[in-house]
Image (spheres, helix red, strand yellow):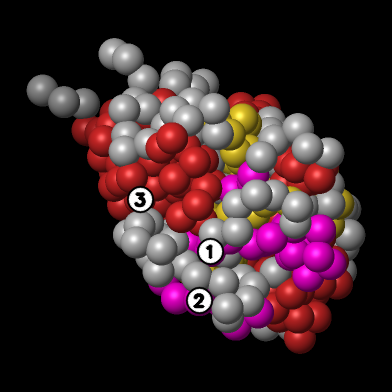
């Protein structure tokens, strides 16, 4: 038979434990809230996985400056190019603390390169999705003295000289690369792809005559407007406001469209309260006239997504792009 005194003692201990939990739980929640309220109390690092001077760098430096003022702390941009824009965010996922003091741009390559090669990080489970920000205007440029006056002429040259007509992009697996591979697939031609670390490196190579053409986001804008380069095509659904006379790839007969949205992420396991603080600061910065002016210069649009919607979009895009990469014959061998 159960000893009544033991039973009563055990029941008292359970009652005490439950009572203790009712006291401790609010304290734990309060501690988390207090920690988030104190955030940020030092500068925040924003990893931009492209070289300084390119279109993404220009955009995010302005956005970070405005958001930093909203947060009351400096946001330091750290350029970490490589891996088609995946090196910086990938390293962050593997080594940074989820304390809100290290965040990164999350380019489309993060959702594509894992289908093309083995990575040490998972694009869906190793990141905290904070906010969707913008999308690129992609274009195809040549030097102003190039013999190719139209996009069709460039494609036709590749048809006549298989494998000898080259172009540069911001890296294997990036949107500028895959857009041209889609064109090559549709036109049944072969281009020679030359990957670079980012827009700044690509533009230098093109101006120096080291590559015939460049496929990239609108970091070529100043060279086109300055007469050093010729814009042969853009890859949007419709022609741009800034260069209305330039046809889209669709106008040229290729049903290839891309805008490659991107946003900001942190390492997995971030405190939701800190994520909200970052989201709200960057959302407010996105609506700032100075930020809108930079987007207008780069011919980019706002692509706002909450953290939850951004994560959902990433899951859907990861699945969809797997099929694209397999169709283009770029998927990693099992």
Question: Residue 317: which disc?
Answer: 3
Image x and y of residue 111, in percent? 44, 41
Q: Residues within 10 Å of mark 2 (few under 14, many from 20)?
A: some
* Residue on which the image places disc 1: 234
Q: Can you say which quadrant of the picture contains the N terminus? A: top left
Image x and y of residue 52, in percent? 83, 47
Region rendered in magenta = 213-242
* Residue on which the image places disc 2: 239
Pointer 1 or 3: first along the chain? 1
Confirm whether the magenta stretch covers residue 214: yes
Question: What is the distance, in whole Å, between disc 1 and disc 2 at their CAs?
Answer: 7 Å
Pointer 3 or 2: first along the chain? 2
Confirm whether the magenta stretch covers residue 84: no
Residue found at x 35% / y 50%: 317
Residue found at x 64% / y 44%: 213
Residue 24 lies left or right of residue 294; in this view the side is left
Question: Residue 185: which disc?
Answer: none
* Label 2 residue SS: loop
Question: What is the distance, in whole Å, between disc 3 and disc 2 at their CAs?
Answer: 24 Å
Q: Pick the residue in front: 64 or 182.
A: 182
Q: Residues within 10 Å of mark 3 (few under 14, many from 20)?
A: some
């Amino acid at each position: 038979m159960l000893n009544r005194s033991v039973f009563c003692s055990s029941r008292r201990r359970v009652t005490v434990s439950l009572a203790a939990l009712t006291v401790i739980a609010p304290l734990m929640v309060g501690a988390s809230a207090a920690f988030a309220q104190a955030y940020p109390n030092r500068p925040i690092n924003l990893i931009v996985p492209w070289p300084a001077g390119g279109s993404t760098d220009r955009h995010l430096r302005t956005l970070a400056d405005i958001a930093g003022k909203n947060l009351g702390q400096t946001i330091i941009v750290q350029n970490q190019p490589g891996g088609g824009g995946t090196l910086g965010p990938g390293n962050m996922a593997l080594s940074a603390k989820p304390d809100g003091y290290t965040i990164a741009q999350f380019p489309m390559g993060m959702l594509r390169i894992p289908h093309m090669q083995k990575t040490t990080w998972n694009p869906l489970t190793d990141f905290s999705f904070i906010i969707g920000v913008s999308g690129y205007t992609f274009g195809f440029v040549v030097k102003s003295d190039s013999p190719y006056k139209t996009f069709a002429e460039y494609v036709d040259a590749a048809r006549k000289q298989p494998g000898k007509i080259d172009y540069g992009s911001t890296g294997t697996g990036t949107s500028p690369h895959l857009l041209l591979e889609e064109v090559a697939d549709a036109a049944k031609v072969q281009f020679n792809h030359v990957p670079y670390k980012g827009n700044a490196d690509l533009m230098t190579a093109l101006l120096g005559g080291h590559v015939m053409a460049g496929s990239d986001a609108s970091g070529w804008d100043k060279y086109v407007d300055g007469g050093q380069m010729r814009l042969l095509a853009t890859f949007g659904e419709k022609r741009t406001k800034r260069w209305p006379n330039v046809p889209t790839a669709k106008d040229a007969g290729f049903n290839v469209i891309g805008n490659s949205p991107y946003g900001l992420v942190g390492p997995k396991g971030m405190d939701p309260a800190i994520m909200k603080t970052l989201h709200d600061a960057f959302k407010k910065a996105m609506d700032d006239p100075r930020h809108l002016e930079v987007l207008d210069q780069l011919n980019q649009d706002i692509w706002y997504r909450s953290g939850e919607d951004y994560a959902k979009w990433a899951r859907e895009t990861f699945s969809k792009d797997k099929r694209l990469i397999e169709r283009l014959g770029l998927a990693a061998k099992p």
